[in-house]
Amino acid sequence: MNSNDQSTTISTFSSGNGSQTQTEKIATQATPAPVRAPGRQLPASVLTPPAPPPPPHLDDYANIISRGQVDALRYLAKELKGKTIKMVNSTAVGGGVAEMLNRLVPLLSELEVATHWDVITGGNDFFEVTKAFHNALHGSPYELTKAAQDIFLMYNEQNRERLHFEEDLVVIHDPQPAALIRSRNKARSDWVWRCHIDLSNPDQKVWEFLRPFIEQYDAAIFSSQSFARQLPISQYLFYPCIDPLSEKNKELTDTQVQKVCDDFGIDRSRPIVTQVSRFDRLKDPVGVVKAYKLAKKYVDCQLVLAGGGATDDPEGAAVLQEVKEAAGEDPDIILLDLPPWCAFEINAIQRASTLIVQKSLREGFGLTVTEALWKGKPTIAGAVGGIPNQIIHKLTGVLVHTVEGCAFQIRYLLTHPEFARQIGISGREHVKENFLMTTNVKRWLLLFRLLQQARGKKSA
Amino acid sequence: MSSTTISAPEKPSAKQPRTAFYFNTSEHLLRIGRQKANNFSELLEALRTCPDDSIFQHTFRTLQEHHFIQQGFSNDFAHWSLFACHEPVLAEQLASVDVREFTSIDGLRDRMVEIVDEFLKQHPRLGSQPALEPFYFCASDLLVLPTSFVADSLPSFVNGLRQVGIHSIQHHFIEARLRLHRMSNDFSQWLDEEAGLPKVADAIERIDIYTNTMEGVRQRIAGMVEQVLK
């Protein structure tokens, strides 16, 4: 290797099947980079999962949402004391659903509404099928075979036999465990299907395969109005949420932010444009690179693409390769493939950023947008999925539809800092009102009370 | 030679309230309705037929969801007309509707229908022009909850005002008229009838909610009452 070469280090982690670390160095032409040192490895702090911090208690949120709001939650939960809830999803780590349940479950339990969390199991064939279903439900063409249906049903049946459903309220998250409804005891429990994905334009065959299961639920919950389907059951809108006290969202000191930037070679003296997402084509990381390159003709900035793979996402490595090819030899493009436990580092990178981008092509809700807004960061995002619920154009952020639009907004926000600051402030207030974990707790309590009232009327 | 004495305006004199003011709050669950509109003609039809709680959601309730916006947020119909349909004329007309002028949903619905109907009569070709995004009619399931703040005096009223959650301000100041079926709000009614401050009550009622954030409204109400206490 030429001794003058400057390298951008990318570390790839494969999670879920035991960890294996590979480091790949890409030789670039020598470019002055005041912070980044050649051949820098990822810091040791990210190589192993940190011990999970203890979950916050309800009173810890009083400084954020006010004592009055915390009291309102206690009052709501009073009539549900002694009742039980079960939450079921497909993965315990990685992705927004697991992150959300990690907080929701303890908070509900603290309110004396005991909540249990189960994760379904399955082989690689099951997760290949459900990933294909995921893409098909987002509108990708897919040939639904009988073999795929049989695999889906077989693993649902295995989990049905393994799990017990004795709670008053059972919540099934997303399509993977949807067929567990066959375990329902109508006399005992209410069942709710919580859909976190964009169902506005699903592959019809896959949807028609799932629909008979969904219609058996007492209610369905979606993250956006546009995701709702024509169903004979009540459909509620629960915006997803973030936890303001989590490692990913808590306040950090400037020293902490600086250290993370130093570790990853991010130069805080220059504008930083960041997208935080899995390496997934639906997040359009290649499009972000293109937008950055268009904007770079007018404004100096760095681009950070920080992502990783959830345990149920086999495509990540292929997409990362596409992004590397698009990035080429630009030393101002920093690609970080991080393991799912790097919440603290993601927090610091977001806080260090001048702008946040989320140029998704399809999106469930887009919690990375919520995280960015909560940190008061001016945010540019694709007008898809649940993002327009978070970003009211030019009030709480800016919405874009194309690479060119994204490039223009990068240029505009970097050259109009006062406007950027103002939308950052409004964005944070929007999250405080609508997308915090405590609001989510409130919605679950309200729904549970409504279902209990309806159940009480039926039995009267 | 006669002289004219100019006196300072009399400071309103409060009386000890006979009954306490109980600060309540309201929480809502958002239900996705079955109706949606892809253009103005469909919007008009849906406005005529959607449930009352849909009209409530998109006019009253949405103010709570957007209470912090400095530039003002009017209602979802106006917002959609501008951002999804690029029709600023209709958007401004719909935005001019002040929900506090209505003591029932029926009246509010009729006003919205009247505006859209009139607009389409003047611009018939715009009725079928597709919007960038559909308008999804939603509705609220509402629950009223108590808070820990009870005021039996003006100082404790101000204290409650300053500390209670913002949803409580919305509940008492904006949504109250649907409960009271009168052109007033809970704060003004209590200050007038219990504390003997009709002028303060009237001034509070005239605070413009569309050019203030809800926090700004709170501060103004508290400030007006504090003036009496000085």
Image (spheres, rainbow, N blue to C red):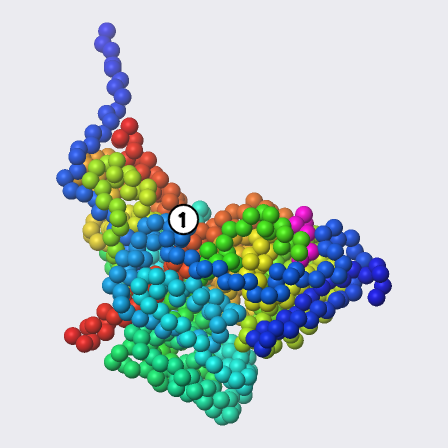
Q: Residue at x 40, y 53 (%)?
A: A61
Which residue does the numbered mark 1 point to in the structure image? A63
Return the residue found at the far bottom. Answer: A146
When the figure is inspected, residue A149 is found, relative to residue A399, above or below; the finding is below
In the image, residue A442 lies in the stretch drawn in magenta: no
Q: Nearer the viewer, residue A418 or A277?
A: A277
In what quadrant of the picture does the N terminus of chain A appear?
bottom right
Q: Residue at x 52, y 47 (%)?
A: A422
Q: Where is residue A119 drawn, in percent x and y?
A: 44, 76
**Looking at the image, can residue A299 be seen?**
no
Q: Residue at x 32, y 82 (%)?
A: A184
Q: Where is residue A222 drawn, in percent x and y?
A: 41, 70
Return the residue found at the far left. Answer: B18
Q: Amino acid at mark 1?
A: Asn
Q: Within the image, what quadrant is residue A156 found in?
A: bottom left
Q: Nearer the viewer, residue A237 or A123?
A: A123
Return the residue found at the far front. Answer: A51
Q: Within the image, what quadrant is residue A314 found in?
A: bottom right
Q: Residue at x 62, y 55 (%)?
A: A260
In what quadrant of the picture does the C terminus of chain A appear?
bottom left
Magenta region: which residues? A264-271
When the figure is inspected, residue B151 is found, relative to residue A362, above or below; the finding is above
Q: Nearer the viewer, residue A141 or A307?
A: A307
Q: Where is residue B123 drawn, in percent x and y?
A: 42, 61
